[in-house]
Amino acid sequence: MKFGMRSTGQIVLCRVALMVAIINSCKQAPQESSVNSLDVVAPGGPQEVIPEGEAEATSKVLEIITDRLKSDYPSGVRPARRDAHAKHHGCVIADFSVIENIEPSLAVGVFRPGSRYKAWIRYSNGNGKDQPDSTGDGRGMAIKITGVPGSKILEGERDASTQDFLMINHPVFFVRNAADYVEFSSKSADGNPFTFFINLNPFNWHLRELNVAREIQSKKVGNPLKIQYWSMTPYLLGQSAIKFSAKPCSANDDSPGVGRDYLREAMGKTLTSGSACFDFLVQRQGDPAKMPIEDPTVDWDSSLAPFKKIATITIPKQSFDSKKQMDFCENMSMTPWHSLPDHRPLGGINRVRRSIYEGISKLRHKMNGVTRAEPTGNERF
């Protein structure tokens, strides 16, 4: 995520506005969506409301991102990387074990008491560029559980045996809905994403979203294996709406390094000498007004709805930086819609992600001449 302005006057204006935004953002109450709603509750999800024009907005976002990917990676520039989370720090094999005493109401889908799965976990940056790890950025943890029976949501992958859970190291997202996603994507394509947040019309400022974006962009971490991650957006768990999180068993992060790829090196050092682990947690929705489905910029208050542990992720001692494994990591597709119906993504941003993630994955694999295929968990390099 880059923020750039075209003139000195604009820079001064936006610096002043930024100061006001940061001061005032914490005072703002959650806003109602600026998109006119059809007030149609989508089937299968609690409190899902599909705004008018969402399908058209989603198509527009996909068009913008597709054009940008083709522009960023013209013929001969390969591999064509993801439009976000472009740089991976590594993919590691892991064990995903559901606790025996899981609360019965949470024992849904993959979360059957005592169930164990092999999983691949991709750690990455958040930006769409392969930039140095010393640059402030969000960090991603994308879990792909394998050996999962049952029919999946995506039409072309009904028989796939995988379930994905995607997270970053921040609890909320910086865009509220599909219409705002179009505007942000358009501004980004023009080289001025900052003007999505603050522009000439003060009634169309997105101050709370700006604060979230700045917090994500400014993050500097020492080791991806030692920080907490959140889903940001809500998901279905049986009949409940939840968010989820992965919290390291040891919460003491390393100091940030200095090399271009120091996060990969930090992961390698940890897993050369021993293992790492995370607690997988879920937070069940309480008051829908305070914990909305359709606005992922709102943090669900953990004092009102505490996170509960339902599984343990164990990453054993291993080496993960061979060329074959790094290529495997580059080619693997991650989407929250690699999912059982019991874990269906909820809300407008997730509905947008369904088309975007699948469309960009197909394009990227075609550009790179690589076959799209879900892993089994038995891969070894």
Image: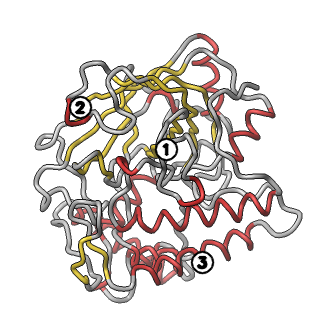
Q: In this orientation, which residue lies closer to the viewer: 351 or 166?
A: 351
Q: Quadrant of the N terminus?
A: bottom right
Residue 247 position, x and y percent, is: 36, 30
Instruction: Tell me if residue 130 comes above or below residue 289 in the rendering.
Output: above
Which residue type does callout 1 highlight? Asp
* SS assignment at label 3: helix
Can you identify the residue that label 2 sits on? 308
Q: CA distance from mark 2 to mark 1?
A: 19 Å
**Is residue 299 shown left or right of residue 331?**
left
- Tell me the element at label 2: strand
Disc 3: which residue? 64
Three-letter amino acid code at disc 2?
A: Lys
The quarter of the rendered structure image containing the C terminus is top right
Mark 1 = which residue? 164
Q: CA distance from mark 2 to mark 3?
A: 39 Å
Task: State which quadrant residue 368 falls in.
Answer: bottom right
